Amino acid sequence: MSVARRAGYRLLGTRLDYFLHLRPAEWPIVAGHTALGYLLAVGLAGARTGAHLAEALLGIALWVVCLNGGTLALNSAFDRDEGDIAYLRRPPPPPRGLAVGALLLMLAGQAAAVVLPSAYQIAYATCVVLSVLYSVPPMRLKAVAGADWIINMIGFGTLTPYAGWAATGLPLEPARGLALIAFCPLFAALYPLTQIYQLEEDIRRGDRTLATALGVGGSLDAAAAALAVAFALFAGAGVAGGWDLGHHAWRWLVLTLALTTWLAVLLPWRRDAARLDAPEHQRGMYRALAAWAVTDLAVLAAFGG
């Protein structure tokens, strides 16, 4: 147990378990991905002047803490994982009432979103429905190979940055909107990589996830294919934005560097996949998350100006 967790238990007792299952270690990544939509909407110049900042901050907070935190806690309540899960090592047993508390947290966020534009409210409500379908029996679509993939690529991939944009109330601009859509297949690339290290536990529990259906090698191959689609869409967004190879060459270079980061993760992982154990696959997942963060920054640099 870490020093921070021991201190938390001394301060809060077993109530800390509820907070841990919200997986606050993931909040900075979700906040960054949501904020990307805001920054694309107002542009870097608008962000420097604080355009629509109050609405964006509220939208990001509700999305990260209430929606994402509640979604992960709801998932934990029904998974009852014993091994490490994403952003929570050695998870405590789900405390009593975790599922109800998680759902109430998500609904509280929905109620608070009434002050934000209707497009944000619709995106939030859509993700609440997807979260319940994903985690809660009898639907529990996370145990249906392919359905779990689609829900996550829509919810986290595209709707999360879209929420940051929608919170501003500004109309969606076509080229940047296409860049947001590109995050759908990009998350399709990331998602199976988050499951590989949990493969044995998912098989033991009987969950038919994408990774259990495809296996390690197939999951990595699917990730590579989805990655190609994502960067083709990013390139299409650049063309729609009028980028040429002269004045805008640096924008193409930024996207190429992001793609190179992904390839630096995937190619060695695919080469060595057969001999890697679960902790090594878990480290691969965190390297992929770093590539995701690099892509967020690259897209912001290329499209935010």
Image (cartoon, rainbow, N blue to C red):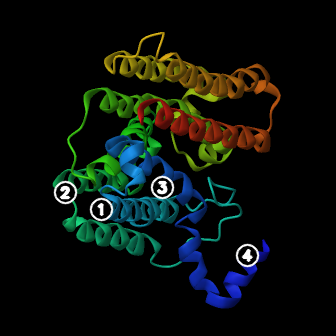
- The residue that label 4 is drawn on is 4
Q: CA distance from mark 1 to mark 2?
A: 9 Å
- The residue that label 2 is drawn on is 117
Mark 3, secondary structure of its residue? helix
Q: Is residue 132 above or below residue 19?
A: above
Of residues 259 and 131, the one drawn nearer to the viewer in this rendering: 259
Q: Nearer the viewer, mark 1 or mark 4?
A: 1
- The residue that label 3 is drawn on is 31
Q: Nearer the viewer, mark 1 or mark 2?
A: 1
Q: Is residue 152 above or below residue 182?
A: below
| Circle nearer the N terminus (1, 2) | 1
Question: Does the rendering let one see residue 112?
Answer: yes
| Residue 65 % position (x, y) | 44, 66
Mark 2, secondary structure of its residue? loop
Q: Residue at x 32, y 52 (%)?
A: 127
**What is the three-letter code of the residue carrying label 1?**
Glu
Q: CA distance from mark 2 to mark 4?
A: 38 Å
- The residue that label 1 is drawn on is 55
Q: CA distance from mark 3 to mark 4?
A: 22 Å
**What is the three-letter code of the residue carrying label 4?**
Ala
Q: CA distance from mark 1 to mark 4?
A: 32 Å
Q: Please tell me how crowded label 1 is: few (under 14), some (14-19), or many (20+) other residues with Cα within 10 Å.
A: some
Asked if marks 1 and 2 touch (Cβ < 8 Å), the reply is yes
